[in-house]
Structure formats: structure tokens, C-alpha cells
Amino acid sequence: MTTLRFPPRAASIVLFLVALAATALASTASAQRLPGTENGEWRYPNGDAGATRSSPLTQIDASNFADLQVAWTWRSDNFNSTPYYFFRSTPIYVDGKLYSLAGGTRRQVVSIDPATGETLWTFREPETIRFLRSPRQAYGKGVAYGELNGRGVIYFTSPGFFLWALDAETGRPLEDWGEPVPLEGFGQTGVVDLLPDLLADWGPWREYVAAGGTYDPNYGIPRELGMITSSAPPIVVNGVIVVLNSHQPGYGQTRIENVPGDIMGFDAATGEFLWKFHVIPRPGEFGHDTWENDAWAWSGNVGQWAGASADPELGIVYLVTNASTIQSYVGHRPGHNLFGGSVLALDVRTGERRWHFQIHHSDQWNYDLPYPPMLLDLNVDGRRIPAAVQNTKQGLVFAFDRRTGEPIWPIVERPVIQTEVPGNYTSPTQPYPSLPEPLDPIILDGITDEFVIDYTPEVRERALEILREFRLGGLYVPPLPYDHMHTEFINQVGCQGAGNVVSHPPTVDPETGILYASHRRTCSATGYMGPTNGVDVDDPTYATVDQGGATPNETPTTGRTVVAWAPVAGAPRLPTVDGLTVWKPINNHLSSVDLNTGRRGWSQPVGETPDELRNHPALGGRDPRTGGSGFSIQMVTGSLLMQAQAFSEGTQQIRHDGTPTLEARDKRTGEIVASVELPAPAQYGMMTYMHQGKQYIVVQVGSIHANHPGALVALTLP
């Protein structure tokens, strides 16, 4: 190896140039971050305004990670807390204090001392009937922060659909803000009733008023018209509060009418209503023609329960929407149904649409978008592109120029299997990005030869025999009508490559452009649909077959008109080979995608392969490294990828494999470089901040026992 030697003066010049280059690189990396994590803060529930769930802090690194100790634990027992799987509020850290929601059905706002975990103040909204009606009481995802004349303000939306502004120091409603609410306990200031502005120009509400109906601020919207609530916090951008909303989950609905989840903007300084964006376009508005059968007039939902991100310099807020009312049968609303299942970029001052992209047309698979667009700068073929990257439940990853919405790589409309349920509608095609590559390639075409288990030739042949009885697809495989008449196959099989990303949000490194996401592989028979015959059902997911129809229910959901077809029980399960899935399993993996090239990187299991699989005789002692049960939660810091195995979410099966740990991984390879034990398994998310010269990591945890409340655990160096 040749060694280059420089004269002393030349060496000094070289060192100076190297240092200058390093400074330039550091400045470039720093410039890529949107505001929110500077000075050791974590101002948004997802870290920065770009929702990257990352921080540039480096005090905790691979050399000292194993020395981390629990500094404090904050429990939510005394706040009417609900079981662990509802605790989704990641705290924010601003100006030396933590702010969050308590994780219970009351959705209390709390301020916490970041050094001791002491509760500094709490705020609870007075009870209303509309609050009690909310199906999203326990799903609060956090709070928003803003400043008015140097004064910190905490903004949050409640299950009752009120917007509050609280003094960050005291937790008291802000003076001279909002408008009086004529209900006991509400006072005269610090709150805005969101319903009047939402309903003012909505046709069904105007008809209700014209017929003699009146507004009751305690009850809210009459059940036959609909119901709206909130889950994600608002976001404050350039002096505007953008309010998001949610509804009864579409998979649990059986009536086709509801109120649309229109997006609204309010003045952060006064609470004054500024604008509203119609998520279901009215006549003359862009996208109106995608609602056939005049479905725009009475359809609802298209809420934004996943949260939002923003680019203050561009003056754009980025949101994702879910589907319209009913997510199993859409014959009553044929068409692509904009802006359901879409990424939306809105002008924060006016609410006007800057651009949009519909991720899936007319959703019938509960593929609602679970996380806001992640904003960062990429270097693609030598071009710097301010990007918006959208992760999905399906395992697809979409990438756009966040200024214009232009896809960074081509997005192709691929033909998909069409519905055979009488009167139903499915789009002939669905969008697939050419790049970035999906988290799991099985979703492109389903269980093709490369994904069939092959532990032994006999096992493979038996799996192929089973699969010959089914029609195979990837994503967007619709259910069949009950008692379908096919003779060539029993049922249809679809595959998913990510799972419910709600429980394990992704993270992205703005300095490298690398996305890290948790995912699992699931393939299943699609199930059957049966006619309702106009009779309401409780929850279509758990309906039973009664002469080809659905079981009646005495408690109707919102709306008036019962959907024509609903899911019914009785679909045959996809058989196994002596307990082995016919596809090569991935239970819990953490994978990387280089967003600069669009190519998948490494993939590492999280947790141990379940004993029943690893010890199966067909494997001959081999470990397929599927990962364990549950999900993975993750966060990027300046030098590390931090990850923890989380719960397997569900009321009937609450599992966690082994000792709960928080792990540090090498960002380049995914290999574990250090780990520390946690007092309980993780859930949903984590965050980090620098307080009085010490970096803390806060992990959301819970108990492996059912009905145990969640908690926050803070770790720091001794």
C-alpha cells in the first residue's frame, strides 16, 4: 500500500480542507432535516415536521448504549387508562417539558418533568354525550405545540371533536381564544366546537335543519346522519392549526351514510375558522366525477386518523386519508372515490389542493394509510429532490417530489382480480411503484414458486397440492360471494407484506435517505360475502352465515341504509402442511430501503423464531429466522438505529417472546451492537430528547397481562 506524505504546511492545508468538507457535509445533512428536533427537542409526536421519527442526538451511541439505566417510569393507572394496545401517544419535548396524552378513554392531557417523570399538570375535557359516543376515545396519538407571543401553547382535539388551546406552563385553557361552548364545565374560552364549521355547508345537515332539526352541542350529530371524532393530533404550521378527524372504523360499519371527514384550518392565535377542504368533492370540484351513482351526496368518512407532516418553507401540510363508508362492499359508491386512500398536499394558508396521489382506488381491504408522509431530501441520480415518502400497510413504498407530487420513479397501474359479488365494484387496476422496491416481493404476484415452502421435497409438493385448489393473487384480491359456483378453485388467496403499520411506525434517516420499516408476511383466503337483505349487522367481521345472509343486529351503526352485502363467517382457511404455512413465513422483520436508489437493503429478524416452527421435524434443525411474534418499534438517532420488539396486538392473543429489550443496531447492516433490558415489552413508539446536558430515550411500554395500562419508561446514561 502506498502512503502519501505531505510537507507540514501542505498537511495543514489538507487537514483544513478535510475539516471544511466535513463541515459542509454536516451542514448539508443538517439542512435536510425539517424543524422539530433542533437543540435536543422533539416538537412533534413523530419527531420533526417531516414525521421521520429521527433525531440528530449522538450522546448515546454504540460504545455506551449497554450502560443505559431506567431514569424514571410514568404510569397511566390513575388516568382511566385502557389496555396496552390503545396507548399510542408518543410524547413531545419542548422548552424543558414533556407533553402527552395519558393513554386512556378520557384522553387527558399531561405535562411531565423530563428529568424525574413527575406529573406537572393534567387537563381533562368535561364529559359530553358526543364524547361517550366516540368509538375512538382511547386512540389519541398525541398533542401539538405552538407559540403565541413567546408563550407556549398545547393544542389537542378530543374524542368529542373539540379543539383546545392550553397554556403550556399551567395546562389551563388559553384566555381570549376560541369561543364559548354553552355546556356545563366548558367555560368561555380556550376551546372551539368543531362541529358547526364542519356541518355548515354539508347537504344532509342543511336538509336536517330545514326539516326543523336543531344543533345540540352536547349530543352532536344525530346518529342517522353520522358521527365524527378525532384520533391524530392537529398540526401547527405557519400560524395555522390543521385539524384532522376520524370515524367509526370502516370495517365495522354496515350503513352507507356518514359525515365526510373534511379537513379544516384554524388561526393558531385566535381559534378563528379559516378554511375547509372537502375530502369528498362537491359538484364542480376536482375529483367529483370519481363518485358515481351520486354517492358524493351521502357518503362519509375519508378521515385522517394517521396524522400529518408539513414543510413550513413550502407552506404545505401533507396528510393521508382512509376509505369512505364501508370497507368491504362498495357497489353503492362505484368509481375511484377521490380523495379516499390518498396522499394530500394542501396549502396551509388557504386549504387549496397543491397535489394529490391516490395510493389505492376504492379501498375494500382495510388498506387505509397508517402513517403520514415522511419528508426528507434525497439524492437520486445526482439530483437533490425534496421528497415525500409514503409507507403502506400493503408493504408498498411510494416516493414523490413533495413540491409537485411528481413520482420520483414511475408508478404503474397493474390489472387486479375483479369482484364477483353481484352489484359490487372494483377498480380494473391499482397503482404499483416501479421503485422503491416493496418491503416484501410476495405482494407483487402472491405465492409464486419462489415463495412456496421447500424444507423438504415432500413438504413442497404437499404445499403445491394445497395451492392448486385456490386462485392466487398478491394484493387487492376481493372476497367471493357466498356459495360461489366455481369448480376450478375453492377460494382466492391474497398476500400482504407489511401488516398493520399503525402498531409499528417506520423511521427514516434524513442524513442517509435510508428507510427502516417493520413488516411481516401474511397470506390468507379472502373470505365470503353474503347479502344482508336490508338487515343491519353488528360487526361484519364477526357475522355468521344464516341462509347465505348476515346475522341481524339490534344496535344499528350510524346512517340509515344498510349495505347490500357484508362479510360472513364460514370461509375455509388456507390449509397447512402438518402445521406449516404453505408460504415461506416472515413473522417479524426489520428491513431497510435506500430511498436514493429505491433498492431494498438488509433484512433482519426481530425476536426468535417460534419453537413450534424451529423444532418442526421438516426443518431438520434449521432456523428459518422468521423473527418472533409481535411487531418492532424503531427510531433513528445520529449514530444508531434503535429498535424494540413489541406486543402482538389483539385482545385474544397478547404475546411477547423472551426478555423485553431495547436494542441498538448498526444502521448499515442491521446487526445488533448492544442491548438493554426493559421493564416491560414495548408498544407503538419511542422518542428522545436532550435535557440539561443528558440525552434520554423514552419508550412506550405495557404489560404482557391483559387490561394492564401502558407506561412511559425513560432511559439515560448513569
Image (cartoon, rainbow, N blue to C red):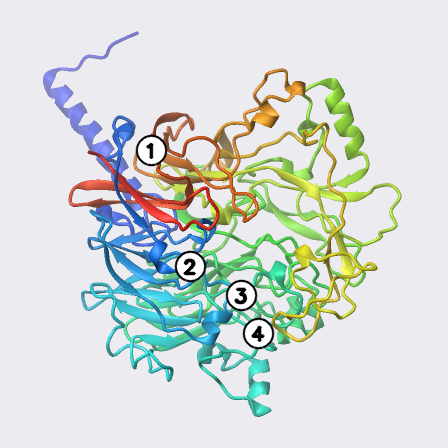
Mark 1 belongs to which amino acid? Leu
Residue 660 percent coordinates (x, y) = 40, 34
Residue 228 against residue 310 in the figure, above or below: below
Q: Which one is in front, 632 or 25?
A: 632
Helix, strand or loop at mark 4: loop
Q: How many numbered marks does the figure carry?
A: 4
CB-based contact (under 8 Å), mark 4 and mark 1: no
Q: CA distance from mark 4 to mark 1?
A: 46 Å
Mark 4 belongs to which amino acid? Gly
Helix, strand or loop at mark 1: loop
State the residue position of label 3. Answer: 247
Q: Is residue 101 visible?
A: no
Which circle marks residue 640 in the picture? 1
Mark sitting earlier along the chain (3/4): 4
Mark 2 belongs to which amino acid? Gly
State the residue position of label 2. Answer: 140
Residue at image position (49%, 85%) is 215
Mark 3 belongs to which amino acid? His
CB-based contact (under 8 Å), mark 3 and mark 4: yes
**On the rendered structure, is 593 left or right of 474?**
left
Q: CA distance from mark 1 to mark 3?
A: 37 Å
Q: CA distance from mark 1 to mark 2?
A: 28 Å
State the residue position of label 4. Answer: 226
Mark sitting earlier along the chain (4/1): 4
Helix, strand or loop at mark 2: loop
CB-based contact (under 8 Å), mark 4 and mark 2: no
